[in-house]
Image: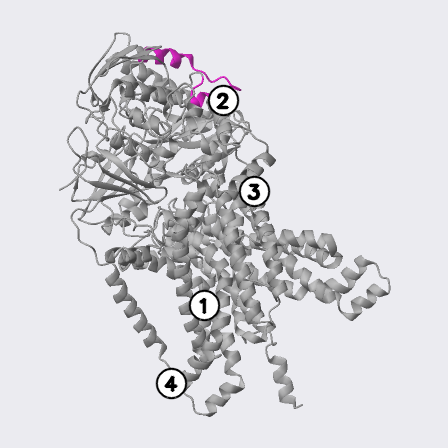
Amino acid sequence: MLAYIARRLIAMPLLLLGVITVAFLLSHFTSADPLTSIIGERQMNNPAVVEAARARWGLDRSLPEQYLVYLKNLLTGDFGTSFRTRQPVAQDLLVRLPATLELVIAAMIVGTVFGVALGVIAARFQNRTPDNLARLFALFGSSVPVFWSGLVVLFIFSVQLGWLPGPGRIGSRMSAPELVTGFYTIDTLVAGDWAGFRSALAQLVLPASVLGWTVTGIVSRMVRASMLDVLGQEYILAARAKGAGQLRILFHHALRNAMLPTLTILGFSFAYLITGAILTETIFSWPGIGSYAVSAARGLDHPAIIGVTIVGGAAFLITNLLTDIAYALVDPRVKIGARATA
Amino acid sequence: MSDVAHRSRQFALPHWATLPVILGGFIVGAWIVIGFTVPFWAPYDPTMLAGMRFLPPGAEHWLGTDALGRDVFTRTLYGVRHSLPIAAAVIVCAVVIGCTLGAIAGFVGGLVDEAIMRLVDVTLSFPPILLAMAVTAALGPGLGNAAIAMVIVWWPIYARLMRAQVLAVREREHVEAAIASGARPSRVLFKHILPLCWSPIIVNATMDFGQVILLAASLSFIGLGAVPPTPEWGQMISDGALHFYRWWIAAGPGLAILTIVLGFNFLGDGLRDLLDPRSK
Amino acid sequence: MKPHLPGLLGGVSAAALAFSAALVAPAAAQDQPLVIARNLEINSLDPHRAFCDTCQIYLSSTYQGLVKLGPDEKSVVPSLATEWTANDDQTQFTFTLAADAVFSDGSPVEAKDVKWTFERLKNIQGDPSFMMAGISSIETPDEKTVVVNMENPNSEFMGILAAPYVGIINSDVAAENGASAGADAATADQAETWFLANSAGSGPYVLDTYRPDDELRFVRNENYWQDAAPIGEIVIDQVADAVSQAQMLQSGQADIAMQVDPDTASTINSPDITIETVPSYNFIYVMFSPGAEGNQVPLDLEVRQALAYAIDYQGIIDFTVGGEGEMQASPIPNGFPGTEGLPMPEENLDKARELLAAKGLEDGFAIDVTVASMNVYGVDLALLMQKIQQDFARINVTINIQPVASAVWREQIANPGIPFSARFYAPDYYGSAQYVQFFGMIPDSWWERNASGQGKVDLVNQKEVDLLQQALASSGEDMEKAYHEIALEMINDRIIVPVVSPNLVLAYRSEIDGVRYSACCNLPLAEISRK
């Protein structure tokens, strides 16, 4: 086990370098000249301006040279300057990262709460109607495109019923709270801004629910399987024979034993959440990494595309590593190296 | 064995035909039939004017009309003619490329194995949608480019799977016997190893089908996949988002994606239940 | 124990309801900032590098030009300059600056700031730099007098000076932060990032914060030397699409929504919201590039005429903007000098077929169309092309649409060229010369270069060259007449074919006053107040 963890840790920097290289190369095989994203339309035919911009953005150097410069800058945390926002990509990402984390964590909470509840119901009523309904609800979650369910819930809860606010991260009349953690729900509380907190929380409900729904399936499946495992074991039968109540058995014995595998499965769900976050942020005008990535890809903002890809890859790598290790520790039956595929 | 029991076994469903499998098979089958036959019975042309713009659902237009007066129902049905073939092409390419490289890695081993598997590791280090976005941003929009991007995302999964299979099968006695008896390596690989490796690959491919359809639609939704006027579902939902208050424009394609992915997930779920007794 | 599921779920949703109702309880505050919902799409906040619609709003509220556009949208009225004179042949302009004008840091606006600003604009070679083309020298005889000398007559110079990009910058502050106005400003200037966080003008507002893709926040300039702006704080909130903007307006989260398209506006039905639809100077056009490499059939004049006749102009207005738009005759927008009485474009399928038959093309042909996938002024360019695709099918002409990122479009239009495409234009200031210089078939105009495949085909129309010279050296009716004739020539070129000038929807909460659309500045923030 230790050898496995050590091997994974040693491989990390190499994989990260691979990620950086692939991200960098992809952006440079593009069909369009990045200059078109930098220079204004009217100056495109002006050779002097084109040359000046090429020199200023370092595009007059050869590809290997650009790559080395990029790597060198990266070591100092410099991801280059975005063509679109004209700000350092690192700064853009830092500002947006908390927004995405807040959304993803909220979605994880939603996914876990509903997933565990459904899993418990399903295990309790194994192969009966509630079990099937719970599985169906969870399956719907992993089948529905979030960019459509997002539209649907916005239409119903925001436009038709008016219960929850529309897109955005905080009410438009409120200014963003003083930066402490970057999580609006926490920062507003720290600042003692109760109205701001309510607004930030209300804004979070719809996107987090839509995103969280996509992982309820994975969680509930895991909870159900683990609980059934435990429920069939002898000590439960013994507890039952001793006259312990249904609920006590369900929650005290079975669920507690199912918690650890469930925690590890949340790591697997990270892949779904990243995919979903990109689309959810687009629908809900959430100023996070996801909507930044979409704008960058649409606008051929190469420094931003590379930056997002590297950061996303790094986050993914670390989560996978932690999950794999945790999973291997918890369940030695699982073949090391297996992982979620989508 | 009594006569009755014997007969009942004859009429009983085979053991793999569980409810999810039947349901999933039915949904997917229905969409396949629609895909093949829709040009013969669709009420309108999917790319041409069919009526006033923004008509709400009614008798003439079951799912209303869009911003260009095209029939949303017709376009939704035609959408399957883009989604299914793309998904099939992506899965087939990913399986062929992934399995070939995986088999080579597992069978040859050594440096070749190292090289292939490190490439697999790096590719799998990206969140799939981010990698697909970066690739399509580089290649330019279009369903073909989106398909290439998705193959790049998916092949490593099969490479890893195939390599593990080959490694496992290699250890078996009859294979070791064949190698010991001096059979040519290619003969050992094709005759003795590969035939035993396919079943998990096929199950995985079925389960990935729905995910490929979702990702393709997602790429189109953010403007990196299908180009207009292609009646592609993700593209149609993105149109619908522009005219949000006309909810019906996105309703058809949304339900279409939901049902077809659900169908594949049912199939995958059913198959997984059969293979993994723990989740029964 | 068997939990009753529907009951349980009902309980949960009721709780959720109560919870969410508590969350959205409105906070009552009178001194709230004014919220404008808008898709920011800012390319820069450096006045001399910026070139976007939001930039116009930003620059015209944080900076002031020597003159500004009057309320009639045509005349030029004093701003930083109290008076000015031009010599007879429109080559020398002399300005006297207001004695009490000060920048937001309290320092006086002086002649050296004007000279520095104009020189930086010219030398930095940004998008708006063309406005300073033709300036030969700038003299500052004293602190409050500026003399600008031109190489050639330019009757439009005063109009240009009213453009937001020509607002006067506090040169000392800018120079301290890396700005440069020298001949090498294009490479030496390092102030772009600084301008993203600071404004350095004399306008009624100053920049508070800018967060890309999130918000642009203004606060009142406490040192403003004229009447203070009525509203203390204004936020332009990033809201990408028309529907969300309308929704924010309806729910009271926004006071003004700027890009609600007519289709969406028609779904708003609330007494609290005022919706005005006004003609705009923006327009969407399609264009032919006979010099593009991808042409399968030579796009000569007759073919271009035939295709222009095959377009269903009224249909396009109905389809793209729900009937809320005007036709436009020439690339000079309706209402600009010289546009009165121009013949409107005409749909005529018989003529189209006749022209194609004369060329032996009655069986049609195919054209490749690359178009930027974007939504401008409520028109989705790809959608517009799909409508034209339906139109052209009637004369057997097939178009293959390829939507691309705007940056890719810009690259391809120059090389290898795009046979047929669609694009948009909004005025940079009030005056017709900018259109001739951009759209006219005069040597080295933007579209002469790109439509001809950088000179592969000769498209130059000498009459337009001569007429433009005439127009720039004259004023009043003579000038109007010259532009009128140029417009007729541009129509006959059939290179640029305007298809719709979308009406602008001004949607705002009824308690807001002073919302208007301006040709130079989009939305003048300092005129907005609460009733």
What are the residue bounds of the magenta stretch?
Answer: C444-472
Among the two numbered marks 2 and 1 on one chain, the one whose residue lies closer to the N terminus: 2
Residue wearing tag 2 = A47
Label 4 amino acid? Met
Question: What residue do we see at 50% from left, 63% from top?
Answer: A267
- Front position in the image: C74 or A308: A308
Q: In the depicted view, which residue is nearer to us: C295 or B234?
A: B234
Labels 4 and 3 positioned on one and the same chain = no
Query: Do badges 2 and 1 share one subunit?
Result: yes
Kind of residue at disc 2: Pro
Work out whether A116 lies above or below C518.
below
Residue C372: x and y, percent? 44, 36
Q: Earlier in the sequence, mark 3 or mark 1?
A: 3
CA separation, marks 4 and 3? 59 Å
Seen from this angle, which residue lies furthest left? Answer: C531
Residue at mark 2: chain = A
In the image, which disc is placed on residue C1?
4
Task: For the residues labelled 3 and 1, say whether their Cβ atoms are less than 8 Å apart.
Answer: no
The N terminus of chain A sits in image quarter: bottom right
